[in-house]
Image (spheres, rainbow, N blue to C red):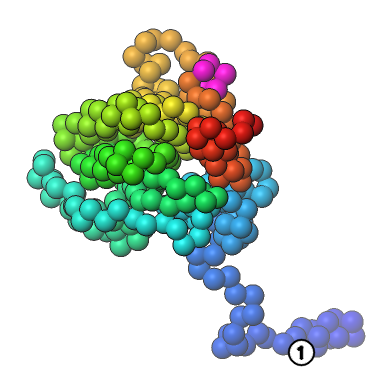
């Protein structure tokens, strides 16, 4: 009798209708996994928290547009439109295709965007690099855009701010990419001679030819917490010198301790910090 009742209940159990709409719908592209704590996070929550993991504090890399939204006063950004395109000096078959694919994927023309804007009312020239475009690598266009921005800062007599994120010089452009190191460095020498302020902000990661040129030449060098900064990677250096490197080597915290950078600034405090530095350089009140 007991067995019959159990079987009867099983028969009466409602079978879900596969044609019904599933109310527990997770939209594609709405979630992101934190690389540090492995937590699955709602993208909008991360975005509203300055692109920082609310669970462990890990810093996500930022798109140029999001960075501009965070740093520049609303409605004040004016992009320099140079209308220049990357060439293909090594005649690599896949390079032009890769660039077009990245333009479509990221919505960016290149790995850097440069223009003018205001920070709490103060006029600045600002350049922002994006790791989503060939790891922020520096080729001809990146070098040309940054050099032009430096020249505009001199002409307009404005402070210059560069947010750096890069894997280094762009291998696909060979020696042309390495030439951008000298070009940007020379332009910054002229900016310095004009007595204008240059603030370099190092974000994760900043490596290679970018570190060896304009990223390291700021009058003031700031960094985000945990940013990896260096020329070559740790493994390459260890293999070259035949020695083990200290724990945390090339982190922003290690470099601050050893005098390479001036201050580590939390992302939510960056805009106010930049404003204070600009104001102080103009002869305003100290911190």
Residue 155: x %, y % from top left: 29, 42
Which residue is depicted at the point 64% across and 31% down?
287
Image quadrant holding the N terminus, namely bottom right
Q: Which contiguous range is marked in magenta?
A: 255-259
Outermost residue on the front side: it is 283
257 is within the stretch colored magenta: yes
- Quadrant in which residue 18 is drawn: bottom right
Work out whether residue 17 or residue 49 is closer to the camera in this orientation and state it.
49
Query: Is 18 situated left or right of 148 in this image?
Result: right
Q: Is residue 271 above or below residue 257?
A: below
Query: Is 220 situated left or right of 231 in this image?
Result: right
Residue 283: x %, y % from top left: 53, 32
Residue behind mark 1? 12
Work out whether residue 9 or residue 148 is closer to the camera in this orientation and state it.
148
Q: Is residue 104 above or below residue 239?
A: below
Residue 186: x %, y % from top left: 25, 28
Asked which secondary structure carries label 1, the reply is helix
| Disc 1 packing (10 Å; few <14; some 14–19; many ≥20) | few
Which residue is depicted at the point 60% across and 88% down?
20
Which residue is depicted at the point 32% across and 26% down?
193
């Amino acid at each position: 009798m007991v067995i019959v009742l159990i079987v009867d209940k099983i028969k009466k159990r409602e079978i879900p209708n596969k044609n019904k709409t599933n109310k527990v719908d997770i939209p594609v592209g709405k979630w992101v996994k934190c690389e540090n704590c492995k937590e699955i996070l709602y993208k909008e929550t991360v975005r509203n928290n300055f692109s920082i993991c609310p669970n462990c504090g890990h810093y996500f890399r930022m798109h140029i547009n999001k960075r501009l939204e965070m740093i520049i006063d609303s409605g004040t950004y004016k992009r320099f439109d140079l209308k220049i395109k990357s060439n293909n000096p090594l005649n690599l078959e896949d390079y032009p295709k890769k660039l077009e694919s990245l333009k479509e994927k990221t919505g960016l023309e290149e790995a850097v965007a440069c223009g003018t804007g205001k920070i709490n009312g103060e006029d600045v020239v600002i350049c922002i690099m994006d790791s989503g475009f060939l790891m922020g690598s520096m080729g001809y266009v990146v070098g040309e855009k940054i050099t032009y921005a430096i020249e505009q800062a001199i002409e307009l007599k404005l402070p210059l701010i560069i947010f750096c994120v890069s894997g280094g010089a762009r291998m696909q452009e060979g020696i042309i990419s390495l030439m951008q190191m000298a070009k940007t460095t020379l332009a910054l020498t002229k900016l310095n001679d004009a007595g204008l302020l240059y603030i370099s902000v190092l974000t994760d990661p900043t490596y290679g030819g970018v570190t060896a040129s304009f990223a390291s030449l700021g009058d003031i060098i700031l960094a985000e917490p945990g940013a990896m900064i260096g020329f070559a990677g740790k493994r390459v250096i260890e293999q070259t010198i035949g020695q083990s490197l200290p724990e945390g080597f090339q982190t922003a915290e290690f470099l601050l301790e050893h005098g390479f950078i001036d201050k580590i600034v939390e992302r939510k405090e960056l805009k106010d910090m930049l404003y204070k530095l600009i104001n102080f350089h103009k002869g305003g009140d100290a911190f």
